[in-house]
Image (cartoon, helix red, strand yellow):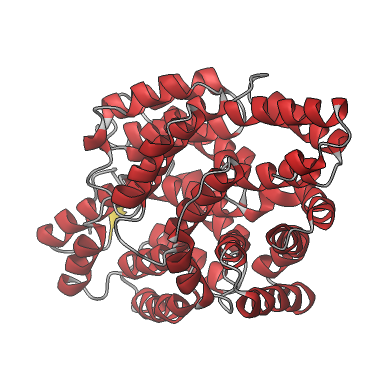
Amino acid sequence: MQTDIFGQTTSLTTSSALTAWNNTMLGFLAHAAVTPEHLGAVLREEPEFCLGHAAKGLFYLLLGRGELVDTAQEALRHARAARAAGAATAREGLYVDALEAWLAGQPSRSVAQLEAILETHPEDTMAMKLSQAIRFVLGDAAGMRRSVERVMPAYGADHPGRGYLLGCHAFALEETGDYDRAEIAGRQALWMAPDDAWGLHAVAHVHDMTCDARAGLEWLTDREAAWAHCNNFRYHVWWHKALMHLDLGQTDEVMALYDTEIRRDKTDDYRDISNATSLLVRLELEGIDVGQRWEELADLSANRTEDGCLIFADLHYLLALSADHREVATARMLQRINQDAKTRTDEAGQRMAAPGVAAADGLAAFGEGRYGAAFHALSGARATMQLAGGSHAQRDVFERLTIDAGIRSGNLDGAEIILDERQASRAGREDAYAAARRALIATGRSAPDARGVLAR
């Protein structure tokens, strides 16, 4: 038995394996690209390390890819065998239970197991981060905040995980609308943990939600070292920077970031696809020609129509398919989402039902130019859209499409109501997108024959 960097007793027996495990946890907290290498080193040296296998399975499930479920199942088998051998601690066993619950289709029960760890081991920073990560997938912002704030008293100034805890707190504060405190916490997080890209990006979210793109660019400029070490999360931080340029009308900078950073690697990771598709949609809604950029995204998305791990991923695949007019693949995606909504009883299936079906129908209708139908469907999905997961900034692409569908279909009052609600969630402020839409609404009301202008 050895004690890890966060003061937790482990079943590891060698100092080299412990070092690799500490590096694994720190890498996970920092979204570091080298994290899998450290975990591989742990399991090669101590293949009966129960917690290592459980963590591997949870890490794979967070990737949201159907073909990786078998890998996570294999990790669970190894973890169970190691626990049965009697070497695992009770804390490590709860990680196995968390993996088992998610593989059974109940990620919220997985969160409950992680929270059980934190009840008795509040200083277990990896359990804290995993709880936030899964809650993020579930769209549970209030739960993220409760979880972090419950364990904060256990983190003294010298706790090696305190900076990462503050980064998680910053993001939870931002997602629950406490923007001033979120910015303070995020800045403190980066000061304590200079590689905490999550805390850095939480401050970027604050600037997005308070409609202050210039301050956001100032925050990110010259801080690239805080996310250069990251796995594909670095593309997401570049996405935030692109959004700020877009709000300022600097579309050349947006295109350059898209080509050189956001889609530097043409991966089909759903998070990378969501960055790319949502940015291209925003550009096109502003009348910007994005050229042939949809084609590669649609090619990748056409291979994901049967995945069904996360409705958040499915909706972004659908954005690409619809934008590139892939009628067959779009129809296949819609059919599968509808079928999942009717037949699946797991939590992912429940989210396919709501907001999935209405949101998917609305996106497809928008792509076909049926703006009245798009507005009706997308408006119907709004009440449950947070259950799709992701952040306010990420889900804003669906808000924009809903508002634009309302304007283009002549439902100006409906579009204005959503604009008002969107403004209220952004500290009462307006970004360039909202200002332009209010101008379009004013044009439509003053000139009823301006339908062509409204429909762009």
Q: Position of residue 209 (x, y in %)?
A: 56, 28
Image vertical order of residue 348 relative to residue 224, above or below? below
Q: Is residue 253 visible?
A: yes
Q: How many marks?
A: 0
Q: Position of residue 42 (x, y in %)?
A: 20, 66
Tell me which residue sits at (72%, 57%) in the image.
366
Farthest residue to the left: give it. Answer: 16
Q: Quadrant of residue 418?
A: top right
Q: Is residue 158 visible?
A: no
Q: Answer left or right for 184 relative to 37.
A: right
Tell me which residue sits at (71%, 64%) in the image.
364
- Nearest the eye: 240 or 191: 240
Tell me which residue sits at (75%, 72%) in the image.
341
Q: Position of residue 310 (x, y in %)?
A: 58, 65
- Nearest the eye: 377 or 101: 377
In the picture, which quadrant includes the C terminus? top right
Q: Answer left or right for 254 relative to 173.
A: left
Image vertical order of residue 200 relative to residue 287, above or below? above
- Nearest the eye: 90 or 210: 210
Image vertical order of residue 298 relative to residue 234, above or below? below
- Nearest the eye: 57 or 416: 416
Q: Position of residue 177 (x, y in %)?
A: 61, 27
Q: Answer left or right for 13 relative to 310.
A: left
In the picture, which quadrant includes the N terminus? bottom left
Tell me which residue sits at (50%, 27%) in the image.
206
